[in-house]
């Protein structure tokens, strides 16, 4: 093109993928620009990941304290101040760097605020400015997906992000969607005293995880938290309740019958859709409703434009987004040819108990035609369950016929910490014997790993 480039690399989106890409590119000596249309730091810092972690931590502490009488805690009059809870959530996000470009500017990254639209393969418009670069990395993330439920536009319902910002806990909540986000929100609102119903189209909660997970969480939700679980239920309509400004009627089909329930709040945890509204056609970048199409180097259909994070679809997690951002930078800026490798990445559902999985599930092995063996142990099989008086959970380890560890699922308090060593084993192709021979603290939740590995190694 006949114009001088303003930057070596322009990165669109400042969430975890974009921030990782920007810092990596700047550190390698590139002249970098970062464009953000919303809050600096993206949805992870500002909307859900960090805010939810801080507020879920509170709800879990509150629920455990209320149940602490068996340990000698007098908690019958325990209360919480919800405005203070919300203030803590906001403070935790700000302390993590939410909506701040200070760190970017300190790294000599030029920051531009506004929506980016491609004018050509080498130019983008941001407001009244036109910026040109040799290379681009698109990290625009995703937004809550729209729902085909009748009445969504004419009634009051909330996205997961909005639900965390409600000024008070509703008396009753209906959550549409029993995936990871839906289960987290059901757990949260129930722990803080709401009457919760969760509706899921498939036959179990958490349908992307192994069957045992959904069954156990269903049991825990109903028996310990009083959550009403409606699996195999299709939500068909939302209707306002006469003479009420806030209450909604949720109409659903279950068992071939139409039923309904009236609640104070409806939360749509129906998934996320990639943000691809960037005039990508002008840049020659191919995409679909599933996201921007990339190869295993995260390169788009244009060799100088890469994409990373939720905008490319697939499984979503903060860790994957940051990894992809750095990988895209190494390939586009340093002309590397590194392929993405997700072995050992962890999927976490932040309920209590938390749910963590890495590698292949048993269902994955069946779909891929991989012969596998498994060991499943309940939480009650280790001493920690007696020490902490908690028995809702299990571990499931999966290995191939050569004893190589393929995957694991762990449901227990702090499972995201317990599974870390298993993630290392999966990523670096350790055997079950190597895992079983590793010493573990006998009175901790990690004893699950040792016991299950010993059982599977026999």
Image (cartoon, rainbow, N blue to C red):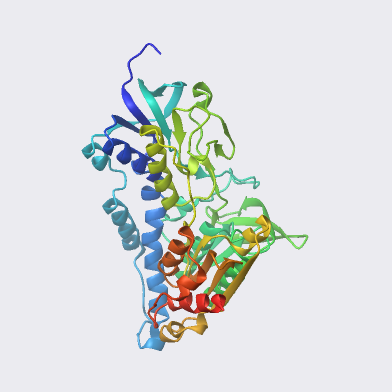
Q: Is residue 127 visible?
A: no
Q: Residue at x 36, y 61 (%)?
A: 54
Q: Is residue 368 left or right of residue 264?
A: right
> Can you say which quadrant of the picture contains the N terminus?
top left
Q: Residue furthest right?
A: 256
Q: Residue furthest left?
A: 106
- 315 in relation to 359, above or below: above
> Can you say which quadrant of the picture contains the C terminus?
bottom right
Give the camera-side residue of 150 and 242: 150
Image coordinates of residue 50 in percent, x first then y, are 37, 55
Where is residue 164, by image quadrant? bottom left
- 88 in relation to 377, above or below: above
Q: Residue at x 59, y 62 (%)?
A: 361
Image coordinates of residue 348 in percent, x first then y, are 47, 61
Give the camera-side residue of 155 and 53: 53
Q: Is residue 423 left or right of residue 153?
A: left
Q: Is residue 456 left or right of residue 111?
A: right
- 268 in relation to 125, above or below: below
Q: Can residue 407 be seen in this view?
A: yes
Give the camera-side residue of 406 and 258: 406
Q: Residue furthest front?
A: 402
Where is residue 131, by image quadrant? top left
Disc tally is 0
Image coordinates of residue 113 in percent, x first then y, are 33, 32
Q: Which residue is drawn at 56% across and 30% down?
A: 286
Give the camera-side residue of 14 and 382: 382
- 160 in relation to 135, above or below: below
Q: In this view, does 128 lie to the left or right of 200?
A: left
Image coordinates of residue 158 in percent, x first then y, are 51, 51
């Amino acid at each position: 093109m006949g114009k001088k480039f303003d930057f070596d690399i322009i990165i669109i989106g400042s969430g975890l993928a974009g921030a990782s890409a920007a810092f990596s590119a700047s550190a390698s000596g590139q002249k970098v620009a970062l464009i953000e249309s919303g809050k600096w730091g993206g949805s992870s810092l500002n909307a859900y990941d960090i805010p939810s972690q801080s507020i879920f931590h509170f709800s879990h502490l509150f629920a455990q304290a209320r149940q602490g009488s068996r340990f000698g805690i007098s908690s019958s009059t325990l209360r919480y101040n919800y405005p203070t809870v919300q203030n803590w959530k906001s403070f935790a996000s700000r302390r993590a760097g939410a909506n701040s470009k200070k760190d970017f500017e300190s790294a000599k990254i030029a920051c531009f605020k506004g929506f980016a639209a491609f004018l050509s393969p080498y130019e983008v418009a941001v407001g009244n400015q036109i910026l040109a670069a040799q290379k681009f990395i698109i990290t625009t993330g995703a937004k809550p997906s729209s729902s085909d439920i009748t009445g969504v536009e004419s009634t009051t319902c909330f996205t997961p992000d909005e639900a965390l910002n409600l000024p008070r806990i509703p008396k009753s909540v209906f959550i549409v969607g029993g995936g990871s986000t839906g289960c987290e929100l059901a757990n949260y609102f129930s722990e803080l005293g709401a009457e919760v119903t969760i509706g899921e189209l498939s036959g179990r909660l958490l349908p992307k995880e192994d069957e045992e997970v959904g069954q156990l969480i269903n049991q825990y939700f109903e028996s310990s938290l009083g959550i009403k679980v409606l699996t195999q239920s299709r939500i068909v309509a939302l209707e306002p309740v006469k003479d009420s400004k806030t209450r909604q009627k949720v109409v659903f089909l279950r068992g071939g019958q139409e039923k309904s329930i009236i609640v104070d709040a409806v939360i749509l945890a129906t998934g996320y859709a990639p943000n691809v509204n960037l005039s990508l056609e002008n840049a020659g970048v191919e995409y679909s409703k599933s996201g921007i199409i990339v190869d295993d180097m995260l390169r788009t259909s244009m060799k100088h434009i890469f994409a990373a994070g939720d905008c490319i679809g697939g499984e979503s997690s903060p860790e994957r987004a940051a990894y992809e951002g750095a990988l895209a930078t190494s390939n586009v800026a340093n002309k590397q040819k590194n392929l993405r490798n997700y072995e050992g990445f962890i999927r976490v559902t932040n309920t209590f108990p938390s749910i963590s999985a890495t590698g292949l599930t048993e269902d994955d092995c069946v779909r891929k035609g991989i012969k596998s063996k498994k060991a499943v142990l309940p939480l009650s099989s280790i001493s920690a369950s007696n020490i902490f008086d908690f028995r809702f959970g299990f571990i499931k380890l999966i290995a191939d016929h050569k004893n190589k560890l393929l995957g694991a699922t762990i449901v227990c308090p702090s499972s995201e910490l317990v599974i870390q060593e298993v993630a290392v084993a999966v990523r670096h192709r350790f055997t079950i014997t190597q895992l079983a021979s590793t010493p573990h603290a006998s009175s901790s939740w990690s004893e699950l790993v040792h016991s299950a590995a010993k059982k599977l190694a026999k």
